[in-house]
Image (cartoon, grey):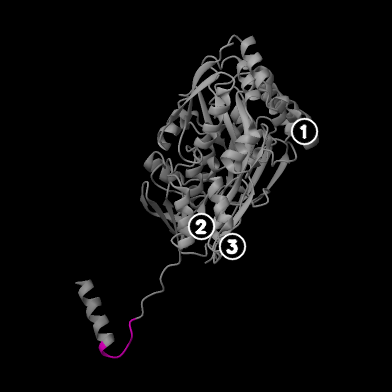
Amino acid sequence: MRALVMAALALALVASGWAVQAGPAPVRFTLGVDQEVVGLDPHIVTAFSSFRRLDLLYNKLVRYNDQLRIEPDLAESWETPDARTYVFRLRRGVRFHSGAELTSEDVKFSLERVLDPATRSPGRSYIDVIESVETPDRYTVRIRLRHPLASLLSGLASGNLAIVEKAAVLQHGNLQRVVAGTGPFMLAEWVPDNYMRLVRNPRYFRRGLPRVDEVVFRVIPDQASLLAGVRSGALDMATINQGSVVVQAKREPGVVVLQKPGINLRIFSFNTTRPPFQNPAVRYALSFAIDRDAIVQTAEMGFAEVSGPVPASVRTYALPVSQFPSYRRDVARARRMLAEAGYPNGFSTRIVTSPTYEGGIAVAQVIQAQLREVGVLATLEQVEWGTYIDRWVKRDFDTMVELRGGDPDPDRFLYRTFHSTGAVNNFLFKDEAVDRLLERGRVNLDPERRKPIYAELQTLLVERAPALFLYVPYETQVLRPAVRGFRLVGNGSLYYLEEVQK
């Protein structure tokens, strides 16, 4: 009945000479990506594809800006009364997408959920020194640590430490298919392996943002097709990582290529519990068999920088790769070392990889050819993206090509990755000397005293070789010329889409 009344009213207005004005069309920003998300629960996910959507749906206490400096996010300020205490003052009036106000109880719940071993959060090892989380009032959070942690703010800036709505988790159990955030956009529609549509959060706490009404992620696995989409105007921006396509984009007059050195690290990892990789001498021998410069040129068309265990772009801590003897390829030495380790005729192995960029198939193909020269016959196991993640989580691989999320603070990257108790130590790597250095580095708050600790650690990790450290790829986005306001972040985060205009 109401619809009939409204229709009659509209006709009456037209008949009386009044024009019926439709509202302005929503401003839509369309972004092309090459892979689908693997869940949306920020405390659980590990894939970059998931984090890039979560960048727009959630906030954290603090975040990295485009200069990789910590800045306020949900916390408007913080103080450290002593080395083991942090006090965060929350912004007032921040609303979840549900309309409920964010309070210190939601922050406490989120941190304790990450710390709960039952959650199996990769972020647990970033903050596992937290002794207690207190809420003196509705807008204050006090964190007490068992011992000092130099990388605490860095850990809290991780996507795995997004603040979620307590009531929503209690209702749904997990957030893999629902969103309970405070971010600039809200989930409106999701057709897996096709597109995800996000709409503007009208209650977003940053005044005047976001500047577009909708962001649509379109999943287009072929990177040449991503470039074609930007060229035609079907896409406003595309995340393009394939070197040959980036080269082509740079020659296109109708597109803009944004690029900067990244902090994510490409590695070739070993399951150190499977023969022959339980022997560090075998792993180290293969480091001499690998030509990292050739991998960068072939797989990335030169848009990357050879790196050790600390991402090369983190100049404060990263050792020059010239200090690692195994970074100068020596096939004869690699063969000799394999013979001394009991493999004079080499051996056979398998490399798990995926056709997506993150799965590194181009890298795997170059490594396969290089290992053949030292008698190692590697079979590529190409699996779809979901299976790749499942194999990674279950440690079901001999070797694997990965892209690991780096960080400006070496503790946050290295401890979780290589400590024997690290949350993402998928190598099942255990080394007492490595553990001791990791433990010393994280409790030392003086940057100058930390540097020699991490220098020694980098040398040791290259020699013990739970993984072969390859390079840091550039972060690259290809945009239409009309797009304004987007800024690249070295860790790949997309939250500056909240400022984009077209």
**Relative depth, front residue between 236 and 231:** 231
* Residue 224 visible within the image: yes
Marks 1 and 2, how far apart at CA: 39 Å
Marks 3 and 1, how far apart at CA: 36 Å
Magenta span: 15-20
Q: Amino acid at mark 1?
A: Lys
Q: Quadrant of the N terminus?
A: bottom left
Q: Amino acid at mark 3?
A: Gly
Answer with left or right where residue 181 lies relative to residue 466.
Answer: left
Sequence-wise, the earlier of marks 1 and 2 is 2
Residue 368 % position (x, y): 53, 27
Q: Residues within 10 Å of mark 1 (few under 14, many from 20)?
A: some
What residue appears at the point 32 percent right and 88 percent down from the top-left corner? 18
Identify the image quadrant of residue 423.
Answer: top right
Task: Name the residue that disc number 2 marks.
Answer: 237
Q: Residues within 10 Å of mark 3 (few under 14, many from 20)?
A: few
What residue appears at the point 54 percent right and 67 percent down from the top-left corner? 482
Residue 136 % position (x, y): 60, 44
Marks 2 and 3, how far apart at CA: 12 Å
Majority secondary structure in the magenta region:
loop
Q: Amino acid at mark 2?
A: Met
Answer with left or right where residue 471 lies relative to residue 165.
Answer: right
Task: Name the residue that disc number 3 marks.
Answer: 485
